[in-house]
Image (cartoon, rainbow, N blue to C red):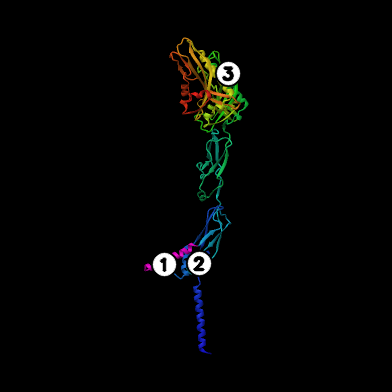
Amino acid sequence: MNKKVALGGGIAAVLIVIIAVVIILMQPKKINLEEYVEISYSGYNEYAVARATLNEGGLYEAILAAKGKKVDYNSIDSFEALGAALSEEMAISECIDKITLSLSQDSNLSNGDTVTVEITYDNEAAKAHKVKFTGSTVTLKVEGLEDALKVDPFEGFEVTFSGISPGGRIEYNYNGTNSNISTYSFSPSQSYDLKNGDIVTVTYSFNEDSMLRQGIVITNQEKEYEVSGLDEYVQSYADLTDDFLNSMKSEAEDKIYSYVASNYNAANSMNGLSYAGYILNISNTTDIWFGSYNSLYLIYSGTVSNTEDSFPATKVYYPVKFSNILNAGGELSYGSLDGIQGSSSFEGGWYSTNGYINPVICYVDIVEKSGDSYSSECGGGFEAFSEYEQVTQMADISDGYKQELYADALDKVESHIANYSGGSKAEGLVFVGDCLLTAKNPGQNLANNNTYIVVYSALVSNTDGYFEDTMVYYPVAYNGIVSLPNGEYMITESKGIQGNSSFSNFFYSTKGYTDGAQMFEKLITANRDNYTYELSDGLKEFDH
């Protein structure tokens, strides 16, 4: 055998072994991460929580060992060596930070449940440290948990309702035996302004973690309660029984007859009293300390006349007010009988009465002027007066009603002329024209919203020649005209003949104006800041 050949073959074999060893040493060392994952759980059966942790310190040491390194900071003798060690530590920590653990379930665990941790990692980062991570999941079975005490806080929780519907209130108290529950932990969805039939939801507030630490589980966090059993204020006319209404109507009639007998003198009388309807006001708030929650006005009308003809026979509306009508377990009652509402003066102003001569004003006073505080229901026939419309132009007044006002104005002027004395007389009384003033900013005081003026004229003279023959203009004013759907009109206030003038002999005077231009200036021009005006042809000659 050739010894050289044998020697060469042996060397080659040694080299192969050396190369194999080198290759093996260069392979990354595998680290099974499952060995470094820990699962723990705590709490009570059905409510336990799990936690997965990574043993970062042990994994760090394993990576260092795989790299064949061991850092001994006590032996480091230079800043360069310290920096290198710290850099190495930081790089390994960054690699470990890329490992994530995901729990299949981390809460509401029960005995017998299996908790699995899924491990994800970055082997590209691990390669730099000559290691390769392996492993995918770690599993643990839950066992040994104690049962928690399940508590319904509404066992022993008492609710009562008090007050008057819809201003009722809730009262509640916890009378149970569990010392961990307090009345102060309950809160209702609404505490005040409650009415029968309302649903109040009471919520129990608690710290779940704190309760669980004490081994307590709250099984019910809220409960609904229906408001019932409260006395209640009547909220609709339909809630009143016929018997109760008839009783109230009888009392209203007694109130009116008693008032008339006590306050009208012998010259005045009221006849033909009849029911005219009702208005029911319901408060928009339950705060009735300074008022009433509801008010029912039973309205009657009667004709008032004066035997001395101090005023013409006039229909008067008497609204009798009943306040705080209550239904207590089906028994109806009212808090107070407040008497006849409103006050009006008869034509001429010498006599007045409780009640309203104009039913539209009655409606405005009771309903519209209380609109911010009350909602209203009107019926029994009186609702017709709720549909009034403001007169804003002369065309809104029918020819038929104009003729009525012309006749009324003529009667007023003739009555005044008939009282002339000392040889004074008026002749040639004629209609001159009419006009309408309309408020630029109308309000709830109807009398201020418009004024309709009818003008007549006559030549006034004195048989004894105490003053020169003089043309006198008699403007008769009607304030606050409104129209109703049935074609009827209502006047808020009849002002009579406007103005007062003296003749050339100052001892003689008359109602009206001896100067047409002055009449126009006082009645129309002086009001142009607040009113627009419309004239018939007969008055346009004075518009300068």
The disc placed on residue 85 is 1
> How dense is the environment of label 1, judged by Cα within 10 Å: few (below 14), some, or many (20 and up)?
some
Q: Which residue, as the protein is rendered here, is positioned at the far left?
A: 78
Secondary structure at badge 3 equals strand
Marks 2 and 3, Cα distance to the nearest angstrom? 108 Å
- The answer to whether the residue labelled 1 contacts the one labelled 3, judged by CB atoms less than 8 Å apart, is no
Residue 204, compared with residue 241, is above or below; it is below
**Structural crowding at the residue carrying mark 2, measured as other residues with C-alpha within 10 Å and reported as few (<14), some (14–19) or many (≥20):** few
Look at the numbered disc 1 and give the secondary structure of its residue: helix
Q: Nearer the viewer, mark 2 or mark 3?
A: 3
Chain part drawn in magenta: 75-98
Q: Earlier in the sequence, mark 2 or mark 1?
A: 1
The residue singled out by tag 2 in the image is: 124
**Which quarter of the figure has residue 234?**
top right
Farthest residue to the right: give it: 242
Amino acid beneath label 1: Ala
Residue 92 in view, yes or no: yes
Q: Nearer the viewer's eye, disc 1 or disc 3?
A: 3
